[in-house]
Amino acid sequence: MNLNQLIDRANALPLSEQRFQHPRPSEFSIRRINEHFQMTLPESLLEFVRSWRSSGRWFASLGGDYDSPEHIIRINSYWRRRRITRRLPHNFVVFNLCHDEDCDCFNLGAYDRTTGEYEIRYWYPGFNEIVSYPSLLHYMDLQISGWQKPKGTIRKNGAAA
């Protein structure tokens, strides 16, 4: 599945009817974020943030709203200040909103120069299992599949939905 197909699937989700996007990333904000984390934000993330009508409900802000508690720099700052048992590993950069303290991160130690993608790692304080995805496309494909209403669900009256 390619990036445009994934974005189309995301925009077709019921949660996309409740549109919300953070301020759009600009050249300046992208450069500032990249310099701050000493990384290069993947183009796939930038395109998803720009094109998915509800990207602000899942992804951290990449725009110029640096004081927002939902900005990528602020979210990571929060998790890096935690006590050592709850602190984000130094090579991880959280890119989602960490709903219920579930954080999805770029693993800066696993960058594919050919694709421009980082390995995606799930991180939760104290959770020691490794859950990873080779790229943002794989990660979003699984997220979107999980958010889609299962076909053939049964309603209260017993009829198939």
Image: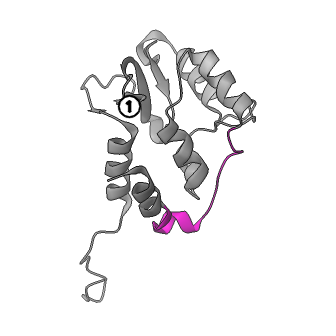
Label 1 element class: loop
Q: Name which residue lies at 56% across and 23% down.
A: 76
Residue 97, can we see it? no
Q: Name which residue lies at 57% across and 56% down.
A: 54
Task: Judge the density around disc 1: few (<14), some (14-19), many (≥20) Cα neighbours within 10 Å.
Answer: few
Q: Name which residue lies at 64% across and 36% down.
A: 62
Magenta stretch containing residue 143, yes or no?
Answer: no
Q: Name which residue lies at 45% across and 59% down.
A: 10
- Seen in the picture, residue 149 relative to 49 is either above or below; the reply is below
Magenta stretch containing residue 14, yes or no?
Answer: yes
The residue that mark 1 highlights is: 115
Depth order, front residue of 144/9: 9
Residue 124, can we see it? yes
Q: Residue furthest front?
A: 114
- Seen in the picture, residue 84 relative to 71 is either above or below; the reply is above
Image coordinates for residue 77, horizontal then vertical, percent: 60, 20
Depth order, front residue of 127/104: 104
Q: Quadrant of residue 64?
A: top right
Left-right relation of 105 to 97:
left
Quarter the C terminus occupies: bottom left
- Seen in the picture, residue 15 relative to 114 is either above or below; the reply is below
Q: How is this picture coloured?
A: one colour
Q: Which span of residues is magenta-colored?
A: 11-25
Image coordinates for residue 17, horizontal then vertical, percent: 56, 68
Q: Total label count?
A: 1
- Predominant secondary structure in magenta? loop
Image coordinates for residue 42, horizontal then vertical, percent: 49, 33
Depth order, front residue of 85/2: 2
Left-right relation of 27 to 44:
right
Residue type, numbered disc 1: Thr
Image coordinates for residue 28, horizontal then vertical, percent: 73, 29
